Amino acid sequence: MLNKAGFKAVSDDALVLRLPDEPGALATVAGSLKDAGVNIESLHILSRGSGHAMIALKTDNRSEAVAAIGSENIF
């Protein structure tokens, strides 16, 4: 039902991030994860608007990802 309405399922271990909707914002996150040795397993854009994008990001190491990204943008 939710899929038909345009919503995507997000697993419990995905990180939901609020990023500025501007060039390079996601690249900055990816670079931080790369530097920490954390792999991105999947990524979904949940919404865009008011100058921000909400994304769901699944990694191979959640705790290391949180440390690398910083909790201020994680919901």
Image (cartoon, grey):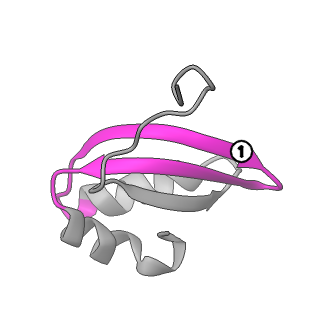
What residue do we see at 70% from left, 50% from top? 22
The residue range painted magenta reads 35-61
Q: In this view, does 1 lie to the left or right of 23?
A: left
Characterize the magenta stretch by its predominant secondary structure.
strand
Q: Which residue is drawn at 29% across and 77% down?
A: 67
Q: Does the magenta stretch include residue 26?
A: no
Q: Depth check: 30 or 52 in front? A: 52
Point out residue 59 in the picture as x, y percentages from the top left corner: 24, 51
Q: What residue do we see at 39% from left, 44% from top?
A: 10
Instruction: Check disc 1 and report the residue beneath it.
Output: 48
Q: How many labels does the image show?
A: 1
Q: Is mark 1 on a helix, strand or loop?
A: strand
Point out residue 55 in the picture as x, y percentages from the top left corner: 52, 49
Question: Which residue is pictured at 51% across the width and 80% down the height?
Answer: 72
x%, y% of residue 17?
51, 60
Q: Nearer the viewer, residue 70 or 34?
A: 70
User: In the rendered structure, does residue 39 fall within the stretch colored magenta?
Assistant: yes
Drawn side of residue 60 relative to residue 13, left or right:
left
Number of residues whose C-alpha sits closer than 10 Å to that of mark 1, classed few (under 14), some (14–19) or many (20 or more):
some
Q: In the figure, 44 relative to 27: above or below?
A: above
- The amino acid beneath tag 1 is Arg
Location of residue 57 with respect to 61 vertically, above or below: above
Q: Is residue 38 above or below residue 47?
A: below
Which residue is outermost to the right? 50
